[in-house]
Amino acid sequence: MAVALLALAGVALASSARFKPGRYTGKTSQGKRAVFTISKTAACKYSRNGPTTQCLTAGNIYLAIKCADGSSTNDYAVPTDGIPANGHIHIVIHQSQGFIPGTQVDDVRVHTNGTITGTLSENVTESANGVKCSTGTVKFSAKH
């Protein structure tokens, strides 16, 4: 079973580069890799709220999902957006149609000290049998 919730949302962005560009690597509280890249750019491809100077992109971050009936599945979070001046990116994706409806919440904080921290969560209901499934709150931390 595959869950396809993509995290692509926009926020207002800083006018100057505050955060260290480059690759950030770390782990989630589920023990999986968390990889991010901060890049300088004239326009962040995924920012919907105007021009940007820095973009955050993530590799697929694996999320283990446990279901109420004892089964399990997985998904990938991909928090990608422009970085606002305060470094806080909050993305909420609601999918009401499709194979598996649900909600994914990505809360990301980019820090000026060369770290990225935050939480990811996903709650879905399998449309075939109505079973509720959740990741719970998955924390992550990555360093430059």
Image (tube, rainbow, N blue to C red):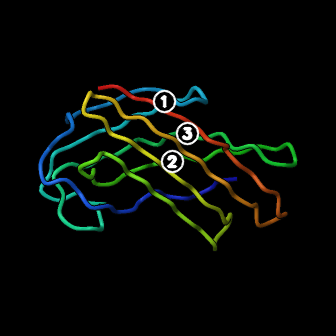
User: Which SS class for mark 1?
Assistant: strand
In the picture of the structure, the residue carrying the numbered disc 2 is: 77
- When the figure is inspected, residue 110 is found, relative to residue 78, above or below; the finding is above
State the residue in front, 55 or 4.
55
Tell me the number on the disc at residue 84.
none
Which residue is rendered at x = 52% and y = 41% of the image? 119
Could you classify mark 2 by the number of other residues whose Cα lies within 10 Å: few (under 14), some (14-19), or many (20 or more)? many
Q: Position of residue 85 (x, y in %)?
A: 23, 50
Q: Residue at x 74, y 61 (%)?
A: 125
Tell me which label, 3 or 1, sits earlier in the chain.
1
Q: Amino acid at mark 3?
A: Tyr
For label 1, count other residues whose C-alpha is less than 10 Å away and answer few (under 14), some (14-19) or many (20+): some
Q: Is residue 18 left or right of residue 124?
A: left
Q: Label 2 is placed on what type of residue?
A: Ala
**C-alpha separation, residue under disc 1 versus residue under disc 2:** 12 Å
Q: Secondary structure at mark 2?
A: strand
Q: Amino acid at mark 1?
A: Arg
Write the residue at 44% across / 30% down.
141
Q: Earlier in the sequence, mark 1 or mark 2?
A: 1
Residue displayed at 58% across by 29% down? 29
Residue 62's x, y, as percent?
55, 39
Quarter of the image where the C terminus is located: top left
Q: Is residue 76 left or right of residue 110?
A: right
The image's mark for residue 62 is 3
Residue 38 in the image: state x and y as whole percent. Answer: 25, 40
Residue annotated with mark 1: 33
Q: Is residue 134 above or below residue 142?
A: below
Badges 3 and 1: C-beta atoms under 8 Å apart? yes
